[in-house]
Image: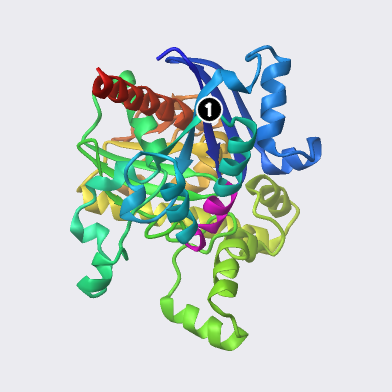
Amino acid sequence: MDKKYLIVNTGSASHKYALYKGSVELANFNFEKRELDLITDIAPVEFLLKTLISKKLIIDAEEIALVCFRIVAPGEYFIENNIIGDEYLSNLKKVEKEAPLHIAPLLDEICAVQKFFPLARLLGVSDSFFHKSLPDVTRRYAVPEADYLSGVKRYGYHGISVASVLRKVESWLGSIPDKIVVCHLGSGSSITAVKGGESIDTSMGLTPLEGVPMGSRVGNIDPGALIYLGEKKGLGYKDLEKYLNEECGVLGLSGKTKDMRDLIELERGGDKNAKLALNSYSYGVKKYIGAYIASLNGLDLLVFTAAIGERSSIMRGRILSNLSGLGIILDREKNDATTSRDGFIHSEKSPVKIAVINTNEMGEMAKEVLQIEGRELLRKS
């Protein structure tokens, strides 16, 4: 395949795009939503199209043969990678409320792409596909089987990121270590236990709400607390959904912001709620690391990736403090020197390797595009 195609990753706090021709990346763009609000009042896709044309990367929109989207959505239908058509869009709308921070922006993005790239085929790449290997003991909630069969189960997310990280690990070390924990830490955060190259447990569940406290998502909470909140505050399901997705997490704990950079500055200024938010976040990640070491019966490699995992040596240091009893010993000098670049940050005395790895979700999705296009060609021949 040598046609040009776009990779689109609409996250909960960013818009990422990459332009490819065959297996070659021609350009990539990463717009944080707060940056987009400052630089333009037009749709990000329209801004992207104008940028591609102005930089002479394409002549017009018709050069783009296919647009590939990262899909964060619960349900068996979305575990597989599929061409996006009317049925796909209809199913996305049905589960929009389960992952509102992702699906609502995704639907807007697809609509914009259809408008500005009307001739392009659309492909959805599942963020849950990597977690298909979850065993029943971690996939199933303790609910009756009928509810499990109706779709109430752990799907997990950030699978594209984890697959990308493992690809890099294999290229570095020549093979994938048997026992790995991957910490994808960003506005949305998840921890994944990998055994023999396969996902055996992951912190996000039916929706991306489960797990560690996140930017504005609550993370783990007693279901009884939800009943209590609903009754005490008079919250209906839609109100409760908004509350749990947009008003909790480190934003709720701090009362000010969900941005880790801002929280660190606030803590330096003596803000106790900012300190609590940072401590709760780092403790939540630490707790999952410990739990997954138990699940794996040991650990060979601990990986930090995504915006916070890659860029914040401060948060990595907080998470990794006092873990020597689990064989995890950080080299603080290496940690401080490794920001936004790949590298190992463990002490020579550490039985467990610790790595910072820049995730390449866009490249991973591009590989899937080539595989799918290759299968299409085989079917036609």
Amino acid at circle 1: Thr
- How many marks are shown on the rendered structure? 1
Determine which quarter of the picture holds residue 246.
bottom right
Q: State the predominant SS element of the stretch in magenta.
A: helix
Q: Nearer the viewer, residue 153 or 103?
A: 103
Q: State the residue in front, 110 or 326.
A: 110
At x 51% / y 42%, what residue is drawn? Answer: 317
The residue drawn where x is 72% and y is 31% is 47
Tell me residue 352's x, y (percent).
31, 36
Considering the numbered disc 1 on the image, is that residue within a helix, a strand or a loop? loop
Query: Do we see residue 327 in this rendering?
Result: no
The boundaries of the magenta stretch are 96-105
- Label 1: few (<14), some (14–19) or many (≥20) C-alpha neighbours in 10 Å: many
Colouring method of the image: rainbow
Residue nearer the viewer, 93 or 210: 93
Q: Position of residue 10 (x, y in %)?
A: 56, 41
Q: Is residue 225 visible?
A: yes
Residue at the bottom extreme of this rendering: 232
Task: Reply above or below: 223 against 60.
Answer: below
Q: Is residue 154 above or below residue 167?
A: below
Q: Is residue 163 above or below residue 5?
A: below
Describe residue 27's horizontal placement relative to residue 77 as left or right. right
Whether residue 101 appears in magenta in the rendering, the answer is yes
The residue pinned by badge 1 equals 338
Q: List x then y, in percent, for residue 90.
A: 46, 54
Would residue 99 be counted in the magenta stretch? Answer: yes
- Name the quarter where the N terminus is drawn: top left
